[in-house]
């Protein structure tokens, strides 16, 4: 028996954003069911828990497990049986953990530990050419996260790992780039290919609210004008058009945004044989595929050079793209932002941008292998919510003991829907879009899929703070059942508690279970390996003690029991939010003050250091289907203020105040803050023209309900056939704007009219 003061289990925050109408880490937070469901015969168990915002996991050849957390901390475990993490490296000063930004990619050298390297890919908290920290884990207003944006970049680094799993020496920076104006579509995956090259991806760093071609100050200095200049259609090449930068005229800079790179794992330089190997531009030489919005996760089909890529869409389509041979000299162009799914993207098509028009009249895009619509189910009857979507995981079955129907299947996840599906292989051996079945449903924000020991599928559940394992027990091994009991469960300190785990069972006769206890509530199962341990709590605390049992085949189960030391069982802090109230109606850019307090019977009034605020944006596709983007946290303050962010409607803000008392008990209160909205009417003269607003086009007249102060892109495509089928060309907007421009939604209902004139000769 060991004795020490008890501590409360760390609380797991949700994704700030990662993913994401923005991407996989705009941080979409789904509202899944409480318990994930798997097909009959499968089990879904916790492999490693107690993590804080985990985003990615990697298994080393020697059994070591590395896990990256969004904040910039990398942890390692000697194996899945290791109950206590070692911090490999803490990169929090360099990483910006804000909305969908953070440490998002990690991989291990396939020859580890002979080559003792771990590679990390993260949002670097620095402007191009600058150094960290620039902003910290926030974005002040001005410039504002969705207004002018807090400019950051991306970084790929190599870490040298010692025998204990700790990084030694200086971080070796292999690559800086990926200029990002807005807080989503940041970096994503880094992984090794079968050719020994390192494959790296990052998003477009553009707006997720409007069609972005660099018209807001162009801070990334995209052509044809310098930074600080608002780019205009049709010549603009900025914003989301960075994803097409390898098609720029000779002499213009190529960016890494929206691309997949193939680089040397020792230097970060382009590998020989890449499609643009002869280019004088170093970035172009690294590119093997481009034209993607937020290719957050990708992976190789085992035994091939095929790279399969999940690309997060905007308002309509999620894509799975296939690169037939990632190491050949062919560069695939998947079309973003000129295309989304298999169709032209209306918001960019309507602006008549030269970059897109030349693609439409030329080779077009490489069509996705599979695309699913945001409003439709991925598989009939899968039970997953529709509306918001963010594809967030890609992995292949290869060496598992899963039923034969899953041989070679492609698993893919959606963090908004909280689901993982299996796309089974067809007659040609490739994943068949007509054979999709649900595999894990009700997941608490899946953000990474990988395979591990036994060939099992593992997934990172960001919202649960866990790495989880999906297994198919054979007929000779079934999962155990953990049963934890305690006596007494409450009393004054010091409190000695007798725990009992011997009631745990295994349905397989003759097996012996092993026990691991977390008795101090710190999330690590490192306090006892006895079946029935004893523990003394020396100070007032509320602790959730946990038991994990493991059978000889490696299958596990957990159970928990609550212990209250010196506390009445039900007295959590009482939290009050004084300001704002639910009556507030906010506009984009509005400064919103907040203030609150908390108290409980044990501590009285709690200090500001015991308080934590969380601002969350809820994006809804229907009154009952919303997903969350955690915007910003405000720890250790009783009052403050925030600037209301921009987002498409319908959406609202949740402001939550959580208080933690001296014993670790928590209480919280949330106020829902609805926006002030306005109806915008769009007309044309003559009537019936197709106008683009944001990412969609519609025939006039029509209306859009938007948030007051929101930034909306509008375009009047020209020429069009209108009255009597005659051709008309655009002449003017009623607000005096250019053919393609942005409007900031006013506070009163307003009509915008696009005027067209008859083409008397040619248009």
Image: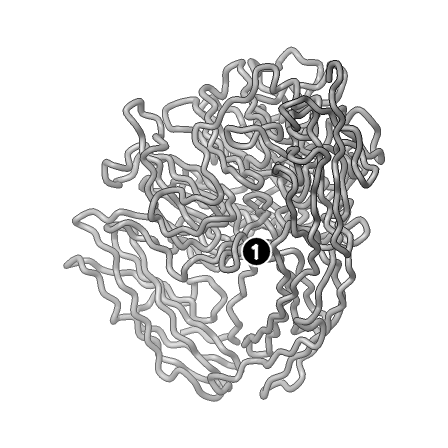
Q: Nearer the viewer, residue 250 or 138?
A: 250
Residue 250 position, x and y percent, is 73, 14
| Res 119 quadrant in image | top right
Q: Nearer the viewer, residue 653 or 489?
A: 653
The residue furthest left is 509
Q: Which quadrant of the rendered structure holds the N terminus?
A: bottom left
| Res 291 quadrant in image | top right
Residue 521 shown left or right of residue 642 in the figure: left
Q: Is the residue 111 above or below the residue 580 in the image?
A: above
Mark 1 lies on residue: 628
**Residue 118 seen from this side:** no
Q: Nearer the viewer, residue 307 or 750?
A: 750
Q: Residues within 10 Å of mark 1 (few under 14, many from 20)?
A: many
Residue 283 position, x and y percent, is 67, 23
Residue 161 position, x and y percent, is 55, 40
| Res 534 quadrant in image | bottom left
Residue 382 position, x and y percent, is 35, 48
Q: Residue at x 51, y 68 (%)?
A: 9
> Judging from the image, what secondary structure is the residue with disc 1 in?
strand
Q: Residue at x 43, y 22 (%)?
A: 305
């Amino acid at each position: 028996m060991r004795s020490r003061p008890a501590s409360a289990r760390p609380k797991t925050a949700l994704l700030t954003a990662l993913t994401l109408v923005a991407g996989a880490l705009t941080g979409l937070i789904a509202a899944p069911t409480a318990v994930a469901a798997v097909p009959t015969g499968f089990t879904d168990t916790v492999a490693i828990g107690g993590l804080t915002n985990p985003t990615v996991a990697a298994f080393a050849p020697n059994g070591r497990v590395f896990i990256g957390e969004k904040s910039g901390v990398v942890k390692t475990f000697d194996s899945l049986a290791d109950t206590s993490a070692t911090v490999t490296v803490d990169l929090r000063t360099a990483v910006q953990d804000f909305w969908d930004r953070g440490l998002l990619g990690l991989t291990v050298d396939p020859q580890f530990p002979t080559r003792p390297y771990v590679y990390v890919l993260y949002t670097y908290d620095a402007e191009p050419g600058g150094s960290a920290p620039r902003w910290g884990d926030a974005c002040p207003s001005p410039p504002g996260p969705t207004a002018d944006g807090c400019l950051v970049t991306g970084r790929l680094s190599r870490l040298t790992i010692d025998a204990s799993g700790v990084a030694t020496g200086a971080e070796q920076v292999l690559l800086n780039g990926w200029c990002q104006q807005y807080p989503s579509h940041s970096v994503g995956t880094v992984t090794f290919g079968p050719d020994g090259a390192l494959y790296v991806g990052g998003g477009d760093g553009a707006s997720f609210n409007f069609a972005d071609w660099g018209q807001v100050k162009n801070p990334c200095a995209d052509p044809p004008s310098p930074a600080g200049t608002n780019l205009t259609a049709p010549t603009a090449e900025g914003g989301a058009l960075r994803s097409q930068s390898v098609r720029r005229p000779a002499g213009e800079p190529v960016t890494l945004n929206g691309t997949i790179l193939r680089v040397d794992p020792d230097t970060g330089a382009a590998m020989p044989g890449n499609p643009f190997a002869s280019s004088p531009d170093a970035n172009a030489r690294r590119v093997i595929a481009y034209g993607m919005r937020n290719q957050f996760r990708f992976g190789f089909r085992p035994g091939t050079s095929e790279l399969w890529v999940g690309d997060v869409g905007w308002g309509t389509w999620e894509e799975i793209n296939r690169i037939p041979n990632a190491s050949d000299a062919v560069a695939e162009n998947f079309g973003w932002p000129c295309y989304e799914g298999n169709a032209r993207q209306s918001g960019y098509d309507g602006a008549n941008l030269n970059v897109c028009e030349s693609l439409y009249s030329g080779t077009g895009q490489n069509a996705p292998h599979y695309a699913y619509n945001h409003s439709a189910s991925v598989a009939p009857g899968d039970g997953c919510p529709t509306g918001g979507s963010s594809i967030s995981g890609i992995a292949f079955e290869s060496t598992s003991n899963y039923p034969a129907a899953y041989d070679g299947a492609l698993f893919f996840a959606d963090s908004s829907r909280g689901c993982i599906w299996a796309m089974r292989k067809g007659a040609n051996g490739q994943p068949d879009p007509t054979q999709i079945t649900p595999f894990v449903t009700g997941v608490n924000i899946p953000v990474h899929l990988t395979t591990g020991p036994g060939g099992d599928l593992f997934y990172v559940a960001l919202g649960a703070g866990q790495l989880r394992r999906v297994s198919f027990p054979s007929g000779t091994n079934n999962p155990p059942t953990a049963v934890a009991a305690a006596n007494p469960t409450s009393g004054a300190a010091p409190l000695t508690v007798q725990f009992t785990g011997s009631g745990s069972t295994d349905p397989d006769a003759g097996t012996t279970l092993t026990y691991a206890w977390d008795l101090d509530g710190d999330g690590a199962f490192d306090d006892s390996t006895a079946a029935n341990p004893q523990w003394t709590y020396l100070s007032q605390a509320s602790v959730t003690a946990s038991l994990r049992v493991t059978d000889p085949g490696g299958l596990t189960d957990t159970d928990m029991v609550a212990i209250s030391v010196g506390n009445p069982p039900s007295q959590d802090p009482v939290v009050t939010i004084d300001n704002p109230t639910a009556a507030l109606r906010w506009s984009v850019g509005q400064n919103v003050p907040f203030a609150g307090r908390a108290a409980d019977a044990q501590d009285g009034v709690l200090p500001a250091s015991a308080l934590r605020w969380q601002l969350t944006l809820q994006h809804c596709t229907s009154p009952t289907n919303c997903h969350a983007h955690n915007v910003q946290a405000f720890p250790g303050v009783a009052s403050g203020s925030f600037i209301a962010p921009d987002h498409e409607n319908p959406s609202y803000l949740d402001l939550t105040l959580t208080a933690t008392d001296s014993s670790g008990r928590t209480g919280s209160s949330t106020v829902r803050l609805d926006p002030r909205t306005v109806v915008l009417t769009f007309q044309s003269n003559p009537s019936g023209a197709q106008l683009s607003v944001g990412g969609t086009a519609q025939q006039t007249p029509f209306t859009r309900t938007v948030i007051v102060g929101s930034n909306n892109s509008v375009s009047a495509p020209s020429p069009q056939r209108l009255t009597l089928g005659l051709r008309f060309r655009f002449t003017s907007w009623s607000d005096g704007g250019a053919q393609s421009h942005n409007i900031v939604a006013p506070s009163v209902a307003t009509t915008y009219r696009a005027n067209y004139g008859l083409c008397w000769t040619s248009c």
